[in-house]
Image: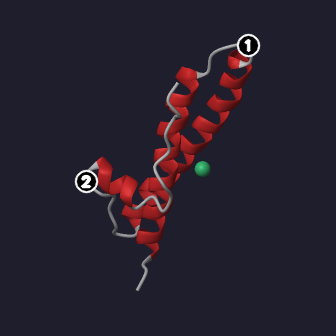
Amino acid sequence: MWTSWWINSFAAGAEFTTFYYYTILRVNAIGFDGEGLKEIIEDARIEDRNHFEVLTPRIYELRGALPRDIRGLADVAGCPDAYLPPG
Ligand SMILES: [Fe+2]
């Protein structure tokens, strides 16, 4: 049976891994459009960080917990790991 906190853990994992990806993407946004893209990437990055920060206390309110290691968090993210293409 799926508990509410477990479903929130899926979502928190997805938000955190996306936040992580956007952080790397922002640092690597270069070139002609790079500066304009950085603003868009930063907005998305902050939005996902905020989602993660809202979900996390809710998980603990529901007597759940986040995985204690980052690999565990990524594994429950419910989406594949994000990566930058080799550049
Ligand atoms: Fe999000």
Q: SS for tag 2?
A: loop
Q: CA distance from mark 2 to mark 1?
A: 41 Å
Q: Mark 2 or mark 1: which comes first in sequence?
A: 1
- Decide: is 21 above or below 1: above
Residue type of the residue flagged with mark 1? Phe
Report which residue position mark 2 lands on: 68
Q: Residue 79: x, y in percent? A: 50, 58
- Decide: is 64 above or below 52: below
65 with respect to 59 (left or right): left
- The response on whether ligand 1 sits within 8 Å of label 2 is no
Residue type of the residue flagged with mark 2? Arg
Q: Residue 13: x, y in percent? A: 44, 54
The residue located at (51%, 38%) in the rendering is 21
Based on the displayed image, in which of its 4 quarters is residue 5 positioned? bottom left
Q: Residues within 10 Å of mark 2 (few under 14, many from 20)?
A: few
- Quadrant in which the N terminus appears: bottom left
Label at residue 32? 1
